[in-house]
Image (cartoon, rainbow, N blue to C red):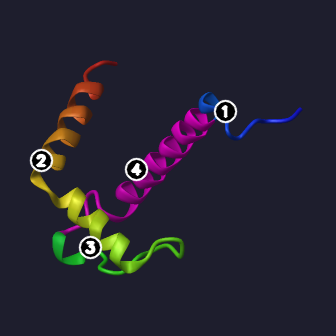
Amino acid sequence: MAINTKDKATEEACTDMMRSAIKNQCYHLKKKYFNGVPANEIRTTSPVDYMSNAQWRDLIAKWSDPKNMVRGSFHILFFANQF
């Protein structure tokens, strides 16, 4: 079976799959290295070899943004009360 990599539907499916994988990986990194960790103990260097220290610091800055923290807390509270 041949896959046409230039087909728009195939390209969109692959893009969606990669976005989902990246989002899932970020979720696990945040859960392990950020959530519940005191601010003075959050790593300033990347804990994984596939991410540079600069990329890690950008991710920490995003997670530390109050706008993102409020949104995450809302989702946690919303979904916790659904079950």
Could you tell which of marks 1 and 4 lies nearer the N-terminus?
1
Q: Which residue is mark 2?
A: 67
* Amino acid identity at mark 3: Ile
Instruction: Decide whether residue 12 is among the magenta residues.
Output: yes
Give the label, 1 or 2, closer to the camera: 1
Mark 2 or mark 3: name the one nearer the start of the chain. 3
Residue 83 in percent (x, y) is at 34, 19
Mark 4 or mark 2, which is nearer to you? 2
Precedes in sequence: disc 3 or disc 4: 4
Q: What x and y, as percent, mark residue 46?
A: 41, 76
Quadrant into which the N terminus falls: top right
Q: Amino acid at mark 2?
A: Lys
Residue that mark 1 sits on: 7
Q: Residue 53 at x, y = what percent?
A: 37, 79
- Amino acid type of the residue that numbered disc 4 sits on in the rendered structure: Tyr
Q: Which residue is mark 3?
A: 42
State how far apart marks 1 and 3 are (Cα).
43 Å
Query: Contact (CB < 8 A) between labels 4 and 2?
Result: no
Q: Residue furthest right?
A: 1
For label 4, the residue is: 27
The stretch in magenta equals 11-38
As helix, strand or loop, the secondary structure at mark 3 comes to loop
Work out whether residue 74 or residue 54 is closer to the camera in this orientation and state it: 54
Mark 1 and mark 4: Cα distance apart in space:
30 Å
Compare residues 35 and 57 and report the one nearer the observer: 57
For label 4, the crowd category at 10 Å Cα-Cα, with few meaning under 14, some 14 to 19 and many 20 or more, is few
Q: Residues within 10 Å of mark 2 (few under 14, many from 20)?
A: few
Circle 1: residue type: Asp
Q: Give the distance between the C-alpha atoms of the residues marked 3 and 4, in whole angstroms.
A: 16 Å
Predominant secondary structure in magenta? Answer: helix
